Image: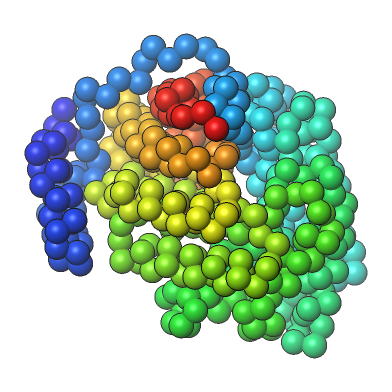
Amino acid sequence: MTHKLPLGRRTFLLSLAALSGMGAFAIADKLRYTNRSWGATDDPEKDFSGIGDASLRDRAAAKGLIYGAAFPHAALSSDSAFAAAFAQECAILVPESVLKWKALRPEPNRFDFAASDLMAEFAHNHGLLFRGHTLVWHRALPQWFEPTVNSRNAEKLLVDHIATVARRYAGKMHSWDVVNEAVHPKDGRSDGLRNSPWLQLLGPDYIDIAFRAAAEADPQALLVYNDYGLDYDTREEEARRTAVLKLLERLKSKGTPIHALGIQAHLLHSDKPFFNPAKLSSFLREVASLNLRILITEMDVTDKKLAVDVTLRDRLVATAYEDYLSVVLQEPAVIAVLTWGLSDRYTWLSQDRPRADKTPVRPLPLDAQLRRKLAWNAIARAFDQAPMR
Ligand code: XIL
């Protein structure tokens, strides 16, 4: 394969990275841009075959882990083949969008639970755990939000929202992403928090307020702080990890009822040179040492920049899944893995990270015909090789 980078060169770069700190980023950047295929290194010796038929759900369960995926609303009433594949492979369902403010709150004084209730019913009927995403986010806010909400009414609105939504599913939720994506060091605050509408309205305490309201409304659910950009050894993601740890430490020291960190893990195969297992493991250890569990909540691997050849592309995507999961599953605090979708038939990446050549994207375990791909094999093998929980 022309894409193979000699192992020696990779090891050399990683050792340089370890030795020279920031300088290594410059070297990696240079290699990346002088040889654009560097990030798309294929290892022809990787063998994804011989996996057997057992579902991801059963393989994860055999290790005390939970596997599941985001369920797209579009598929619920119209796609029985997809629904059957979902029920076969998954043990937990998270609605992809119908529990967001925009979906639940058509008007300031009206909630619409029609779609989320159907998801809860589907989960219940198929013996799946149900997971909530998300009670507080700076995106997916309804149009009425900005003109209606101010610093006088914001706290009541937030607490009422959480009380109403979390109470509706109380006792039925495995876990809630109480707050999503509150960290954004690029906004320049010393605490690394995002300058979101919630922060502007209520100050940094909005996070604590949200967790307390969620704990009161649903004392049984695992309460999760969820965020992205925590995966790679880049300056930006290092800053994000540091800010997330700072936030988690602050919440724990205040006695905030938070139980877990959700790591979205939207991976980019072309960022592979920046994948540093030791750094990722030590971040997970630090989170675990705060007495928090960890969930991988939205995993997918974008193939936006990969070769058009589907066989090669699928191998690279599968490699990214396996490399990442084989590291994170070593950490006993990791209790669940969810992908952001199950089949390439429904993935947000077709809109958010389309390919320049317009060919369909292939980031998920099943293809658009619901057939298992190499990414499925890679996840299956990572579960098979994971230590028992
Ligand atoms: C995405 C959905 O998948 C899209 O359908 C929607 O248009 C936008 O939101 N991080 C998150 C998720 O926490 O809520 C996002 O979901 C994907 C990124």
Q: Is residue 292 visible?
A: yes
Which quarter of the figure has residue 323?
A: top left
Residue 355 lies, with reference to residue 207, above or below; the image says above
Residue 19 lies, with reference to residue 80, above or below; the image says below
Counting from the top left corner in percent of width and height, residue 189 is at 48, 82
Q: Nearer the viewer, residue 255 or 265?
A: 255
Counting from the top left corner in percent of width and height, residue 133 is at 68, 52
Q: Nearer the viewer, residue 142 or 226?
A: 226
Counting from the top left corner in percent of width and height, residue 113 is at 85, 51
Name the residue located 38 percent from the left edge and 48 percent from the top edge.
281
- Quadrant into which the N terminus falls: top left
- Quadrant into which the C terminus falls: top right
The number of discs equals 0
Which quarter of the figure has residue 377?
A: top left
Q: Nearer the viewer, residue 218 or 313?
A: 218
Q: Residue furthest right?
A: 109
Q: Is residue 334 left or right of residue 138?
A: left
Residue 100 lies, with reference to residue 253, above or below; the image says above
Q: Is residue 194 left or right of residue 375?
A: right
Name the residue located 61 percent from the left edge and 59 percent from the top edge.
225
Q: Is residue 54 left or right of residue 309?
A: right
Name the residue located 42 percent from the left edge and 75 percent from the top edge.
186
Residue 285 lies, with reference to residue 102, above or below; the image says above
Q: Is residue 140 visible?
A: no
Which quarter of the figure has residue 179?
A: bottom right
Counting from the top left corner in percent of width and height, residue 119 is at 78, 39
Name the residue located 43 percent from the left edge and 63 percent from the top edge.
241
